[in-house]
Image (cartoon, grey):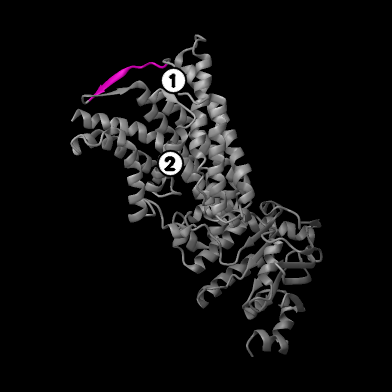
Amino acid sequence: MDIFIQQIINGLVLGSIYALVALGYTMVYGIMGLINFAHGEVVMIGALVALSVIKLLANSGLPGVVIVLIGLMAAALVCMAVGFAIERVAYRPLRKAPKLAPLITAIGVSIVLQNLAMLIWGRNYHAFPPILPNGEHEILGATITSVQIAIIIIAAAMMGGLILLINRTRLGRAMRATAENPGIAQLMGVNINQIISLTFVIGSALAAVAGLMVSANYSIAHYYMGFVLGLKAFTAAVLGGIGNLAGAMLGGILLGLIESLGAGYIGDLTGGFFGSNYQDVFAFLVLICVLVFRPSGLVGEKAAERA
Amino acid sequence: MKPISAALSRDHLAMTNTSPLLIVEGLRVAYGGIQAVRGITFHVNSGEMVALIGANGAGKTSTLKALARLLDAAGGSVRYAGKEIVGLPPHQLVGQGIALVPEGRGVFPRMSIAENLLMGAYCRSDKAEIARDVDYVYGLLPRLKERAQQLAGTLSGGEQQMLAIGRALMSRPKLLLLDEPSMGLAPIMVQKVFEVIQTVAREGMTTLLVEQNAKLALEVSSRAYVMESGEITLTDDSVKLLADPKVRAAYLGE
């Protein structure tokens, strides 16, 4: 039973991170009908920038939490700039091109960013310095760390903030209007280029937070981490129904839970034949099942309506 | 009914009927090599409703789209309130006072009626005035008020057309462009939509009405232009056009 609770906790933490990244995919898809496959690399850049700044300040005598916040700010600013640039360079010139073209440039951007990161940060794994309070708390026989609690709370707060932004503000209305019909939104006076840029910037800020969370929770970051993480977050977005914000959140949390429960029990279920190193299988099994049985996702609308 | 109408009648008096608010000269629109609009010239005076009628494919909607900057003009000039607007980005037009009610209505189906109206006022920041104009629109279109929180996609075609008109009014336009407001509507709804259009026009709104239903358009407008294969072939007071045997034969089915 305590394994079950433990895996639920791990799944919630992982799921919160997936959800933040999945939001970036789904927001861009909702507005432009485009899968930004470079989004995972933005998460990686966020993790590495944050880590670099944190390492730099690790011996400065500042409290750990303050150092991490400074790292987060730096990561968010860099990621926002990167997200803005990705849209300008790789997608805007192809706004009227067939959908396949920006998909290919997305993969190109992804490769460029990975190699750039490799040049800057090298091929090695970077360890997260132990500057955060590593308190452990007991819940129903399972343990949860302070970092994990913080991850869940911060992710929930950011998602709540995003929902308010999208549903209650003038900017959010303009974003939804652009997603529904860019031509008509323009007639209302919406500068859709600006809205699209902002969408990338907001998604990238969420990615920066997620990147820091990954490196803080798993104590590690490297230039290749964005690829699989990005694919999984994309899976989460598809699971929830791509283009749908609530769907991305739900899909992220569910995928985190599926993965961590799957990894926790796969050994028992297969008599030890498969170990928890098969964790990644679950995400892609989910992706295949969703695409086959419910392509519109759990809460998504029919895919035909966009496209 | 007060806010928009009051604002309008003031503008109306200031500019008087004789000054053209919109002057289109030699406007051409082309899709690839095909010329949809072949150098047309017309104007709309402040405070009047002008109709642009013609058969399907005559180039009416292309003309309107070029005016609203949704299409690039291939040539010619469009002067609005004395300024050339041909090079302006489309999202800046509404701030200048031009509102288009597009063909096929174009409401945001997954936004509520209230939100659709707020989108109409997107370029405005005067919250109190916006709230008054929302009330004005609800006064004009009471059916929308009952359903303010409902998604626009759940409305009937006629109600969506009303909403599109209400939304356009929310920007407090000086020039209202209406593209085929009767299209695809049941006759009873067409009548209701045109009652609304007439009410707005009577309050002094300068309006350019593009309409396939020539009879209806001529009945509500003061002047009209007849378009045929991308050219304006006839223009006169609407009353005279209504009586013109050629127009009656070609467009009124007699």
Residue A227, compared with residue B8, is above or below; it is above
- Image quarter of residue B70: bottom right
Does residue A119 belong to the magenta stretch? Answer: no
> Left or right: where does residue B219 sit relative to residue A11?
right
Q: Which residues are magenta?
A: A132-139
Residue labelled with disc 2: A231
Q: Position of residue B55 (x, y in %)?
A: 65, 79
- Residue in the image at 45% along x and 24% along y: A125
Give, as a three-letter code, the residue at label 2: Leu
For badge 1, the amino acid type reads Ala
What residue does disc 1 label?
A127
Residue B123 visible within the image = no
- Rendered location of residue B86, percent (x, y): 76, 58
Q: Do tag 2 and tag 1 residues touch (Cβ < 8 Å)?
A: no
Comparing B170 with A123, the one in front is A123
User: Left or right: where does residue A156 sit relative to residue B221?
Assistant: left
